[in-house]
Amino acid sequence: MSAALDMTASNEKSAISIKGLVKRYGQFVAIDHLSLEIPRGEFFVIVGPSGCGKTTLLRILAGLDKPTEGVIETIQPTKGRPGNSMVFQGDSIFPWMNVWDNAAYGLRMRNAPKAEIDEVVGHYLDRTGLRRFAQNYPHQLSGGMRQRVSIARAFANDPEILLMDEPFSALDAQNKLLLQEELLRIWEEHRKTVVFITHSVDEAVILGDRIMVMTAQPGRIKSFVDVNLPRPRDVMELQRTPEFAELVHTIWVSLRDEVNRAKRQAEGEG
């Protein structure tokens, strides 16, 4: 089967449709015949052991890498909007631009009118608590604040699909909690389709509508878990509920064997 990336959704309800996705690097198989549908507006979370192909899948969806086999269909962006925006694990904002210019970057690349840029960027800087830091440069910000800029830039760009690769993994517990709450509040406004990668089972349950558990390399789908918890979500209150604990346990039971298998694979390579 030849590989293809089509910017037209397979049906009106799907934002992403993946059929028979395979990704090889030489003899190494990173992703092995993965198929799934992600509905529009779903907050879709992927968990799996290190090396299972999570980031590879996200890079393929972002157009930064190409599949070896399979077909990927994504929603057609409306005129003037990008198909996707990506928030990376580490710092990805431009060090030579201040906060405002970083957040406005995507809109300016699309030649959006100044009035629109001012309105949209101002809105998301307000939502992320960055308005008073608009003229600061990245070196003047904490790690958590720099990730806030990345989130503001991604939402301001108004993509059809938001791709997030462990965006909070390098943060301390307090900042991680604050940004999880901030992301949920912003997402509630427009219900963007989100594909979010994390190693944290707790974070997956806090954020997601549905969670895909992947196997150790080669990456396959092991299970799907629906997160039937009400929205909007209060992160602190949610973590106190038995329903939250039960979901975390269910996902960890599915994931544990794969984490152990990935560890054995790494030790065998060593």
Image: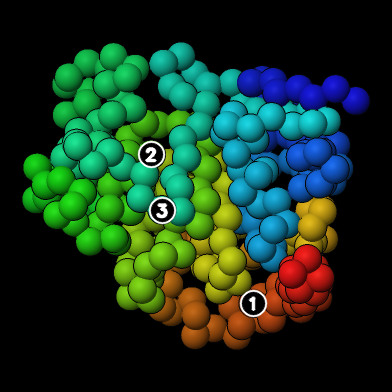
Name the kind of residue labelled 2 in the image. Ala
Left or right of 168? Residue 210 is: right
Residue 85 percent across, percent down from the top left: 46, 35
Q: Residue 153 lies in what quarter of the image?
A: top left
Q: Residue 259 lies in what quarter of the image?
A: bottom right
Q: Which tag, 2 or 1, sits closer to the chain's start? A: 2
- CB contact under 8 Å: marks 2 and 1: no
Quarter holding the N terminus is top right
Q: Which tag, 2 or 3, sits closer to the chain's start? A: 3
- CA separation in Å, label 2 and label 3: 14 Å
Residue 124 percent across, percent down from the top left: 26, 43
Q: Which residue does the image show at 52% across and 26% down from the upper left? A: 83
Residue 251 percent across, percent down from the top left: 71, 72
| Closer to the eye: label 2 or 1 | 2
Q: Is residue 19 above or below residue 217?
A: above
Residue to which mark 2 is pinned:
154
Label 1, secondary structure: give it: helix
| Closer to the eye: label 3 or 1 | 3
- CA separation in Å, label 3 and label 1: 26 Å
Name the kind of residue labelled 3 in the image. Gly
Looking at the image, which is closer to me, 56 or 174?
A: 56
Q: Is residue 42 visible?
A: no
Residue to which mark 3 is pinned:
90
Left or right of 105? Residue 59 is: right
Residue 154 percent across, percent down from the top left: 38, 39
Q: Which residue does the image show at 52% across and 43% down from the upper left? A: 163
- CB contact under 8 Å: marks 2 and 3: no
